[in-house]
Image (cartoon, rainbow, N blue to C red):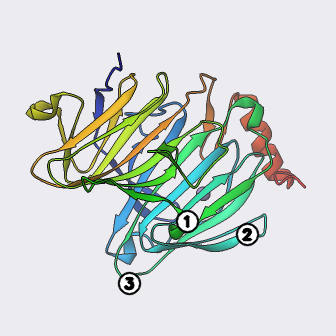
Amino acid sequence: MATERTIEEIVTPTPVSEGAGVRLRRSIATRHLDYLDPFLLFDHFGSEDPADYLAGFPMHPHRGIETVTYMLDGSVAHADSLGNSGVIGAGDVQWMTAGSGILHEEMPKAGPRRLDGFQVWVNLPAKLKLTRPRYQDVAAAKIPELVRPDGVSVRVVAGVVDGVAGAVKEIHAEPEYLDVSLPANRTFEQPVPRGHTALAYVFQGEVSFGEASDAASGRVAATRLVVLGDGDVVRVSTGERPARLLLLSGKPLGEPVARYGPFVMNTAEEIRETLRELREGTFIRP
Ligand code: MN
């Protein structure tokens, strides 16, 4: 029989200042929750005030991870050492595999409404830490959006819902990245492989998980990250208010983690080697 995934932990995001002074809300990569294998970081940037984000993230390196940027509103201009540049706009996703190393800048642009989006870091296994860097840039129109007869709608960034495959593919962690909108008094069920890490990020309204949909104790109001326990299926329900959440899952690596800022390797020696290559100008592989 299928087991529903229930709430294991509810995380209140921590306000932090990152990059050259961008104010954002962090739920993973904090003192409270350092790592939720394979997810190394979860940031939510959202503000109507450009002073909160215009400083941006000037040129900086990454190695050993993937960064996933998904925008709800506003836009971020990017450019990198591979010669890529462009703008991640509302509804777009950029799945960047840093692998052996990139240098890039990520600069939010002002207005016209608000800046709203997410960045998640997904760990790479030891065998792919030094893989060739690559991008999957997906424009909003290329992200499948399905609307069920009951009005529940899902943007499938990665993974499969109702037989519809997401836009981002061939990622080691076999991730699922869904943007789920529920009207009031609806339920959304999604199978998630047993053993995979699963989390939900509730950013609008209020939801409950599992059978306890009528129990006040099972409700989670925005804005919170919810770590879900193991099982076969995620069941999320709304009450009198509509809600919107991200549902993420991925295969844990179970490998040692040595992290130092934007570099995540398996050993301290690999971090020292990375810093040495940065000093000596050999960080970017030909
Ligand atoms: Mn970056």
Foreground mark, 2 or 1, reads 1
Query: Is the shortest distance between ligand 1 and the CB of mark 1 under 8 Å?
Result: no
Amino acid identity at mark 1: Lys
Q: Residue at x 35, y 15 (%)?
A: 1
- Which residue type carries mark 2? Asn
Front-most of residues 139 and 49: 139
Q: Circle 1 sits on which residue?
A: 142
Q: Position of residue 184 (x, y in %)?
A: 15, 53
Q: Is residue 238 left or right of residue 147?
A: left
Could you tell whether 216 is left or right of 75 in the image? left
Write down the residue under mark 3.
112
Task: Give the percent coordinates (x, y) of residue 80.
Answer: 71, 66
Q: Which residue is mark 2?
A: 84
Q: CA distance from mark 3 to mark 1?
A: 23 Å
The tag earlier along the polypeptide, 3 or 1, is: 3
Q: Is residue 35 above or below residue 136?
A: above
Asked if the residue under mark 2 is in contact with the one under mark 3, i.e. CB atoms within 8 Å, the reply is: no
Q: Which mark is residue 65?
A: none
